[in-house]
Image (spheres, helix red, strand yellow):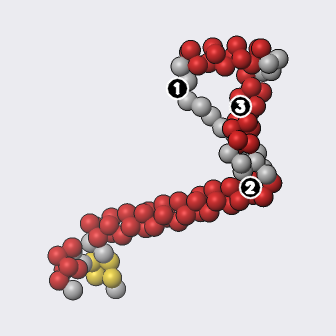
Amino acid sequence: MSVNLSIKNASDEVVAALKLRAQQNHRSLQGELMAIIEAAARESGRFTVPGLQEAAATWTSRDEADAAKEARERDIERVVALMREGLSLGGRRFTRDEMHER
C-alpha cells in the first residue's frame, strides 16, 4: 500500500534549492523528494523488509489506538450532552442535581 505525503509551508528558498537539486540529479521534484526520503530511511537502518513491516505494524497499531481514543472521547461527549439535557430513564427525565444525588 502506498501513502501520499504532503509537506506544508515550505519556504520559497527551500523549494528553489530542492528544484535545483532535482535538476542537477536529472529528476523531477517528486523524484528528488522520494530519493531524499528513501536515503533517510536507509540511513536509519530500518529499510529492510522486516524493518519496514515492523514500522508499518507500529503505525497501524498507533492508528487503531488513536481511533479507539477518539471513539471514547465521542462517547464521553455524548454522555455529557445527555447529562446536560437531563438523562431520560424509564420515561422520566432526571436533572443533573437528581442524578448527582443518586
Q: Nearer the viewer, residue 44 or 25?
A: 44
Q: Secondary structure at mark 1?
A: loop
Q: Visible in this render: residue 67? A: no
- Return the x and y of residue 17 as percentages of the image width and height: 64, 16
Disc number placed over residue 47 in the picture, else none: none
- Return the x and y of residue 23 as percentages of the image width and height: 77, 14
The amino acid on which the numbered mark 2 sits, given as a three-letter code, is Gly
Quadrant of residue 86 within the rendered picture = bottom left
- Return the x and y of residue 37 as percentages of the image width and height: 70, 36
Q: Nearer the viewer, mark 1 or mark 3?
A: 3
Q: Nearer the viewer, mark 1 or mark 2?
A: 2
Residue that mark 1 sits on? 9
Q: Nearer the viewer, residue 48 or 63?
A: 48
Residue that mark 3 sits on? 36
Q: Nearer the viewer, residue 28 or 26?
A: 26
Image height check: is 70 above or below 92?
above
Image quadrant for the C terminus? bottom left
Q: Residue at x 70, y 41 (%)?
A: 43
Disc number placed over residue 51 in the picture, else none: 2
Going from the N terminus, do you reach mark 1 or mark 2 first? Answer: 1
Going from the N terminus, do you reach mark 1 or mark 3 first? Answer: 1
Answer left or right for 36 relative to 12: right
Asked if the residues shown at circle 1 and circle 3 are in contact, with their CB atoms under 8 angstroms apart, the answer is: no
Q: Residues within 10 Å of mark 3 (few under 14, many from 20)?
A: few
Q: CA distance from mark 3 to mark 2?
A: 18 Å
Q: Secondary structure at mark 2?
A: helix
Answer left or right for 32 relative to 13: right
Q: Nearer the viewer, residue 59 or 20?
A: 20
Going from the N terminus, do you reach mark 3 or mark 2 first? Answer: 3
The amino acid on which the numbered mark 3 sits, given as a three-letter code, is Ile
